[in-house]
Amino acid sequence: MAKNIYAQESMPDKLVVIPCASFAGLQDAIVGAAQAGLDFYHIVTFQDKATSAGLLSLQAWLSDNHKILHVQVPDASGLMAALKDMDVDRVAIYQHVEEVDDNPEYLAAALVALRCAADSARGTFAHKKVKGMTADSYTPTTYAAAIAAGINIYTKVAGEKRVFMGTCANGPKTFIDNVIKDDWIRFNVQSKIFALLGEANDGAGVTYDDTGIQSVAAAIGNVFTQAAGSDRQYIMEGFEVEYKTYDYLKENNEEDVRKRNLPLISGRYSRMNSIHTVNTVKLNVTL
């Protein structure tokens, strides 16, 4: 558990490209890479035989392990039709406009590396500069249908390789950068709290009193402040951290207090997604 948290706490930019002979063996390849000790957050793969059932199965592992899979396919329409109404927010599907030969370009890998190299949560994936422009391979109608389906397209426009949108496979409901921002905040909140449990009070751990509760709230507020700062800008519309006093918990959560299972903190923050829509996220901390 600790390794899963601390390995990723502030590095959601780590990327691994995993060679895999077939889509059927992809999950084993990813799990094997993780078990081998490779430290990564983004996974990029080219799969011409990807199936919706296989991606749904991968979604569960990716969600449990807080990773994102970018899948490059020659034709995304069938996959997106099957996945659009599913809660697949850890998989992003990319469609290449040009023909894919025996040695395909890993433009999805290049894209993710470019957007995530320095700070994956900060950059938006929607390429607004070229929104509305189409390559010769796409008509405006085809382009509009692809965007409505949540397919990530990369192609050449005006001689430059471009990407449009940046959505996960549940259609244009969840954006890649939203998932990454939330993961960065989650990783760092967990890291701060684990540090308090193990290091506060000369190693005795955080106390179960008002001082301890306030120290946890302050740690969460510190992470929110970092996320809202100009260096990151993950939180765009403000945040708040709320907590109850120990006396309140004893009176209203007697059994939890007895078990040292305290519903300590609730925090809320708002962040803007790729198309400038504000979403509010609630974070609950129980010790």
Image: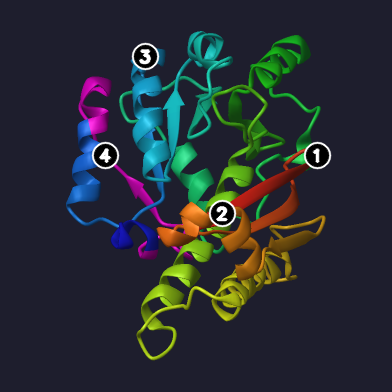
What secondary structure is found at the residue carrying circle 3? Answer: helix
Distance between the Cα atoms at labels 1 and 2? 37 Å
Measuring from the top left, give residue 7's x and y in whole percent: 35, 63
Mark 3: few, some, or many residues within 10 Å (few <14, many ≥20)?
few
- Residue drawn at x 21%, y 57% is 37
Find out whether the residues at labels 2 and 3 contact each other: C-beta distance under 8 Å. no
10 Å neighbourhood of mark 1: few (<14), some, or many (≥20)?
A: few
**145, above or below 128, in the image:** above
Distance between mark 3 and mark 1 Cα atoms: 30 Å
Q: Identify residue type, mark 4.
A: Ile
Mark 4: secondary structure = helix
Secondary structure under badge 1? Answer: loop
Magenta run includes residue 222: no
The residue identified by callout 3 is 53
Of the residues shown, which amino acid type is indicated by label 2?
Asn
Pointer 2: what residue? 253
Task: Give the amino acid at mark 1.
Answer: Thr
- Residue at 37% x, 14% y: name it: 53
Q: Is residue 181 visible?
A: no
Front position in the image: 137 or 124: 124
Q: Would you name the residue on which mark 1 appears?
A: 277
Chain-order first, disc 4 or disc 1:
4
Whether label 4 touches label 3, CB < 8 Å: no
Q: Return the residue nearer the eye: 134 or 23.
A: 23
Q: Which residue is mark 4?
A: 30
Query: What's drawn in magenta, residue-wise?
Result: 6-27
- Which mark, by number, is residue 118? none
